[in-house]
Amino acid sequence: MSTAFFSHPDCLAHVMARSHPESPQRLQAIDEQIRASGLGPVLQRREAPLVDLGRVRLAHDAAHVDRLQSALEPLAASGRSQVLDADTMAGPGTWAAMCRAAGAAVAATDAVMAGEVRNAFCAVRPPGHHATHSTAMGFCFFNNVAIAARHALTAHGLQRVAIIDFDVHHGNGTEDIIAGDERVLMVSYFQHPHYPHSGDMPTADNLLNLPVAAGTGGAQVRALIDQHWLPRLDAFAPQMLFISAGFDAHREDPLGQLGLVEADYAWITRRLMDVADRHAQGRIVSCLEGGYHLGALGRSVAAHLRVLASFPDTSN
């Protein structure tokens, strides 16, 4: 079975500001690196559909969904922009982009559960893991991974799913949504102290947070994953894995101060695939979160995809 690659041109139309780091060029950098690496022919490209808002309400307060729809959907016709917080803005293309991003995560879940593909990656924006149950923040509007995880539980009858978050920033929104839901185990590492200045004190037993200091490199992160993530994931035995795939812990990224490189992301992906093979029939859905150095982002996503697709690395 192949690896699906979900995306949509609408995700390029979301623009927060000309100099904003969460830019359309992020997806373009990923596409360019996929072509350069030879990965294109081994990925099954699929167009992200618009999400059913009923799926979004599995993870978000209905008032939050209605509030965003009433505020952001009209921007497409008016051409105006709207500021939601100091670093989160919406423009004419935002509503469609966020509906495609969440739609990709749901459609990827359906494709993997149906056995059409072994795993899937969603190259979408805006990202999602800072969006809480009732608040948009940190570049995020809908929490794509949390929506997909809840969809797997409700629509496909799974009893246990895992969310793995390896962004440099704490996935506070995902934690807010799934804290206390014993059907979901969330494991993460993130730089601390750092935006959003949370996560050092987990709020529920189904959360395993590994805050690390600025300057932490790949060797230390790998050791923490071996010592903490993997035993907890094996004990939980998830029936599907969802990855909040942030690549801003890369040593070249301007929004973080960790020291990971492409080989570290490949190593993490292999370990997660091993967990999925042991417990979840290989089922993984990975969704793009952060990553703001365009070159490092493209190379890191390619390393992640190369492992997901079991595509040999011929660069050495």
Image (tube, rainbow, N blue to C red):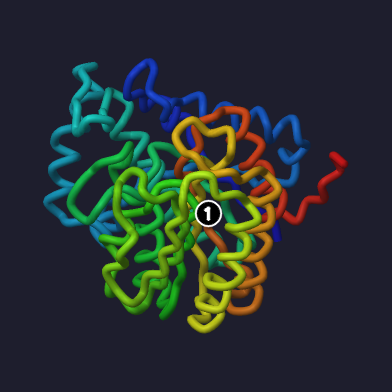
Q: Disc 1 on helix, strand or loop?
A: strand
From this view, report whether residue 35 is shown above or below residue 180. above
Q: Position of residue 166 (x, y in %)?
A: 50, 53
Say which residue appears at 49% left-offset and 39% top-offset.
257
Q: Give the crowd class for mark 1: few <14, some 14-19, many >=20 residues within 10 Å.
A: many
From this view, report whether residue 122 is shown above or below residue 118. above
Please say whether residue 31 is visible from this viewpoint.
yes
Q: Position of residue 81 (x, y in %)?
A: 22, 21
Say which residue appears at 47% left-offset and 57% top-offset.
189
Residue nearest the observer in this picture, 104 or 181: 181
Q: Position of residue 137 (x, y in %)?
A: 26, 41
Q: Position of residue 79 (x, y in %)?
A: 24, 16
Lateral position of residue 267 relative to residue 132, left or right:
right
Lateral position of residue 118 relative to residue 245, left or right:
right
Total marks shown come to 1
Residue nearest the observer in this picture, 143 or 9: 143
Q: Which residue is mark 1?
A: 286
